[in-house]
């Protein structure tokens, strides 16, 4: 299986045992990447829920194969996505996740229902 990109919401679904987390299988998680911007979102949410910052980072990092730095190429893609995503209210974090997937031509996994409406040339899997 090739690399897949995870949105912060997918990682958080695992942490909080939310509906859809069961769709993120061991084989899928073994090839999963997350962008640094989305990893910051995961850590933020975990800290807000009472996790120690170091523990939050380490625990989140254990769930993915790699954290990918936010590159200038991804920044350009994320900025350009505003015209296609603005009607759906996607944040910069959302667009940075999609930009990583687009730059790698990889599928992306999320819990965000509104992403079902996006046609960006990559497979988008909404896990619930």
Image: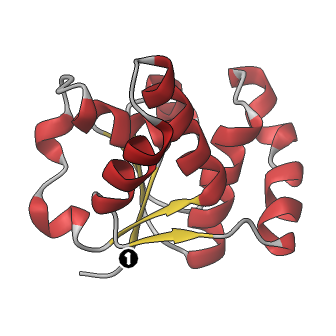
Residue 30 lies, in percent from the top left, at: 22, 71
Q: Can you say whether 73 is above or below 116 in the image?
A: below
Side (left or right) of 94 relative to 43: right
Q: Quadrant of residue 123?
A: bottom left
Q: Can you say whether 108 is above or below 14 in the image?
A: below
Q: Which of 50 and 9 is in front in this view?
A: 50
Residue 39 lies, in percent from the top left, at: 54, 50
Q: Which residue is drawn at 48% across and 27% down?
A: 47
Q: Residue at x 73, y 31 (%)?
A: 91
Q: Residue at x 21, y 23 (%)?
A: 18
Side (left or right) of 115 relative to 111: right
Side (left or right) of 29 relative to 79: left
Q: Residue at x 42, y 63 (%)?
A: 107
Q: Residue furthest bottom?
A: 2
Instruction: Give the residue pinned by disc 1.
Output: 3
Residue 119 visible here? no
In the picture, the quarter occupied by the C terminus is top left
Q: Which type of secondary structure does the marked residue at label 1 adopt?
A: loop
Q: Quadrant of residue 49?
A: top left
Q: Which residue lies furthest to the top in this view?
A: 49
In the picture, the quarter occupied by the N terminus is bottom left
Residue 4 visible here? yes
């Amino acid at each position: 299986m090739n690399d897949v990109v995870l949105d912060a919401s997918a990682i958080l679904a695992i942490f909080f045992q939310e509906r859809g987390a069961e769709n993120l299988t061991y084989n899928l998680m073994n090839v999963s990447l997350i962008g640094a911007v989305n990893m910051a979102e995961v850590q933020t949410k975990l800290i807000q829920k009472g996790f120690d910052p170091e523990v939050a980072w380490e625990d989140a990092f254990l769930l993915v194969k790699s954290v990918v730095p936010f590159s200038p190429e991804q920044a350009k893609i994320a900025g350009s996505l505003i015209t296609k995503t603005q009607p759906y209210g996607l944040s910069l974090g959302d667009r940075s996740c999609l930009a990583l997937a687009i730059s790698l031509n990889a599928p992306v996994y999320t819990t965000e229902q509104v992403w079902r409406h996006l046609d960006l040339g990559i497979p988008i899997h909404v896990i619930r």
